[in-house]
Image (spheres, rainbow, N blue to C red):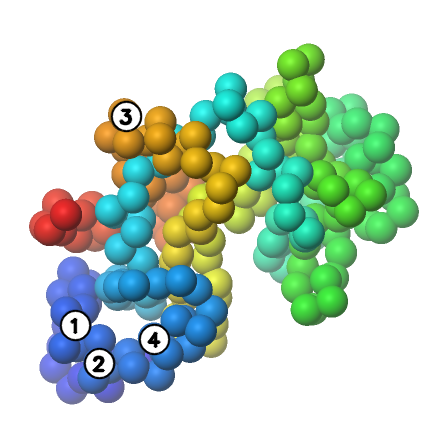
Amino acid sequence: MLVNKQKLSFSSMVFTSEKKSIYLAPFLVLLRKTFYICSMFQLGKTIVSEDLIEKDFVCNLGACKGECCIAGEAGAPLSKEEIIILEEIYPKLKPFLRSEGIEAIEAQGTHIISPLDELETPLVNGKECAYVSFSENGTAGCGIEDAYNAGAVDFRKPVSCHLYPVRVQDYSEFSAVNYHKWPICNDACTLGAQLKVPVYKFVKDALIRKFGEYWYAELEKVAAKHDY
C-alpha cells in the first residue's frame, strides 16, 4: 500500500499529517466521503480514527437497554466465515433464541444479503436483530453470546457486534477502523468519561480478536504518545 522506498517498522507507520498527504491521499479522500473522520493514523494495513484514543466509552445497559441491537435499519455485518459458522451452530442456538427470532431466521435464513450486497443478520419485522434475547427488565442481549456463555457453542458473537462502537470497513488494500457515534449511546459516552475509559480500551478484546495482540500493542504505544 505504501509507496515509500524506505523500510518502515510497524510502529513507525503511524502517519504524521505530512505523510498522510503524500501516501494516503487517495484513501483519505475515500474515507472522508464514507465516515465523519477528522484525523487518523496508520498501523500496518489499517487506518485508524484518532477518536478511538480521544473519545471515552463504556456501555451503560441500565440506561440504554441494549438499544444498539434494536435501532437501525439493518442487521449486524457478517463476514463470509461467520455466515458458515452461524449455519453450523444454529441448531445449538435455538434454545437461546426467542420464538420471534427463530421464525425470522427460518423464514429469511441465518444471514441475509442486503440491497447493498452486504452480509448481515436478519431482523424481526424490520426491527431488532433476530438473534436478540431480552432480559426480564427488557434489556436486549445477544442469544449467540448467551449460548457461548452457557458453553453450548464456542463462537462468542459476530466480530462486528463485539467491536461496537468501533466499525471496521475492509477495502482491497487496507481496513478503516472508525468510531461510530449516535445518540442512543450518549449514556455510554458519559459513563466512559466518568470512568476515563477510552474507546480502544473498552473494546480491547474485540480489537485483539480482529487484528491480533501485536497490532493492539502498537495501538497502545500510539495512545501513550498521543497529545490529547
> Counting residues from the N terminus, which is met first, the one under dot 4 or under dot 3?
4
Q: CA distance from mark 3 to mark 1?
A: 31 Å
> Counting residues from the N terminus, which is met first, the one under dot 3 or under dot 2?
2
Tally of marks: 4
Q: Residue 221 in the image: state x and y as whole percent.
A: 15, 49
Tag 1 and tag 2, C-beta contact below 8 Å: yes
Tag 1 and tag 4, C-beta contact below 8 Å: no
Density class for disc 4 (Cα within 10 Å; few <14, some 14-19, many ≥20) is some
Element assignment for label 3: helix
Q: Residue 120 in the image: state x and y as whole percent.
A: 68, 54
Q: Please tell me which residue lies in front, 210 or 100.
A: 100
Q: CA distance from mark 1 to mark 4?
A: 11 Å
Q: Is residue 34 above or below residue 110?
A: below
Q: Residue 90 in the image: state x and y as whole percent.
A: 76, 38
Q: Amino acid at mark 4?
A: Leu
Question: Is residue 225 visible in the rendered structure shown here?
Answer: yes
> Counting residues from the N terminus, which is met first, the one under dot 1 or under dot 4?
1
Element assignment for label 1: helix
